Image (cartoon, rainbow, N blue to C red):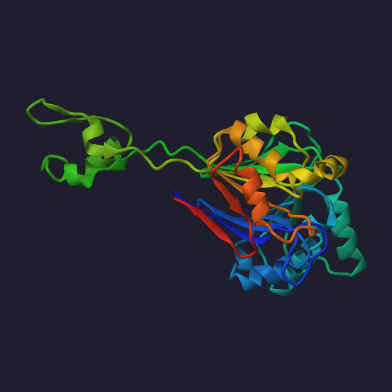
């Protein structure tokens, strides 16, 4: 199993030359998911070599501009590239009206099927599921309706063959492999039983990623994201500006680290920094007072788990 996250943008509010608004690409179990689509996202996709044709699912956390103003441009570019594959967009109620109005007024209807999944639940709900992956909402608390997203590899029940051990027993043939993968012991011709644990290995660990976009400190997310391998949590402000964070319903680096600690996550990524700060290392230092394994989001940064 493997999980690869590419940060296309991780800053708040207005774009700058080197400060791009929120957008991420998650590669998990042969899926390529786009998470948020701030202004300039399609340029960032080009810059980091992401194939547009592989994006079939886009998840929008909320309808503030720095998280979705790049969406209509990307949708239009897909048409210019003669896309034929359907595109699914998941986002707050109202996103369909916002996007289709722009397409209507510019007479730029798509030549592919554009499917909107509008959200309004304040509970965690299943958004997407196939044989490999499932995606849930993470209800957040911001100035407007907002969700994060939880991506989980589905359980692989088949065990891995331990070929080193299997080759020691000539009686075991290729036709026996399926039963071994399903956990069955092997019965020798003389009646002896070889335990399955000697012939197979545990399947790879299923990986998970939680994206918590704009939100104030909100402990109800903890049971939803508990034990995830990788957590992105916004940290717009430092503790010294906690009063501003509360007023604007954002989080501090310290608060993000408390969520990570209580949820027992593997790694914490901080991002969505306010432009008022010049030294981002202060965010990491503040968070590490509570949670050691902290990564600072940077434009173009790739985090990979295996």
Q: Is residue 33 in sight in this rendering?
A: yes
Q: Which of 29 and 272 is in front in this view?
A: 272
Q: In this view, does 286 lie to the left or right of 265?
A: right
Residue appearing at x 12%, y 40% in the figure: 171
Please tell me whether residue 255 is drawn above or below residue 56 in the rendered image.
above
Q: Please give left or right for residue 69 compared with residue 5 in the image.
A: right
The answer to which image quadrant residue 169 occupies is top left
The residue at 82%/66% (across/down) is 109
Residue sitting nearer the eye, 235 or 58: 235
Q: Is residue 210 visible?
A: no
Relative placement, left or right, of 207 versus 258 is: left
Q: Where is residue 298 in the image (x, y as percent from the top left)?
A: 64, 61
Farthest left residue? 190
Quadrant of residue 35 within the rendered picture: bottom right
Residue at x-position 61% and y-position 37%: 290
- Please tell me how many numbered marks the rendered image carries: 0
Please state the horizontal and vertical placement of residue 241, each as a whole percent of the image: 81, 46
Image-based side of 103 in relation to 158, left or right: right
Residue 246: give x, y in percent of width and height.
Answer: 84, 39
Residue visible at 51% across and 40% down? 154
Where in the figure is residue 43, as x and y percent of width and height?
70, 71
Q: In this view, does 143 lie above or below 70?
A: above
């Amino acid at each position: 199993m493997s999980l690869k996250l590419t940060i296309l943008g991780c800053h708040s509010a207005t774009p700058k030359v080197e400060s791009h608004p929120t957008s991420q690409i998650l590669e998990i179990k042969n899926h390529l998911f786009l998470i948020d689509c701030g202004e300039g996202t399609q340029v960032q996709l080009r810059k980091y070599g992401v194939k547009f044709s592989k994006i079939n699912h886009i998840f929008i956390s909320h309808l503030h501009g720095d998280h979705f103003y790049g969406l209509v441009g990307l949708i239009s570019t897909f048409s210019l590239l003669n896309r034929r594959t359907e595109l699914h967009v998941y986002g707050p109620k109202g996103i369909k009206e916002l996007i289709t109005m722009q397409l209507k007024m510019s007479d730029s209807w798509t030549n592919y099927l554009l499917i909107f999944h509008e959200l309004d639940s304040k509970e965690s709900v299943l958004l997407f599921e196939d044989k490999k992956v499932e995606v849930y909402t993470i209800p957040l608390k911001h100035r407007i309706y907002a969700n994060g997203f939880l991506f989980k590899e589905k359980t692989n029940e088949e065990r891995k063959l331990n070929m080193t051990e299997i080759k020691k027993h000539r009686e075991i043939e290729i036709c026996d492999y399926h039963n071994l993968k399903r956990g069955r012991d092997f019965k020798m011709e003389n009646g002896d039983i070889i335990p399955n644990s000697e012939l197979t290995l545990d399947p790879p660990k299923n990986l998970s990623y939680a994206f918590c976009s704009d939100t104030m400190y909100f402990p109800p997310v903890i049971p939803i994201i508990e034990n995830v391998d990788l957590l992105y949590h916004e940290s717009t402000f430092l503790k010294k500006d906690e009063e501003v964070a509360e007023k604007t319903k954002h989080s501090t680096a310290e608060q993000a680290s408390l969520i990570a600690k209580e949820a027992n996550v593997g790694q914490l990524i901080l991002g969505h920094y306010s432009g008022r700060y010049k030294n981002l290392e202060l965010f990491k230092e503040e968070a590490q007072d509570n949670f050691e394994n902290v990564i600072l989001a940077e434009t173009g940064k790739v985090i990979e788990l295996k």
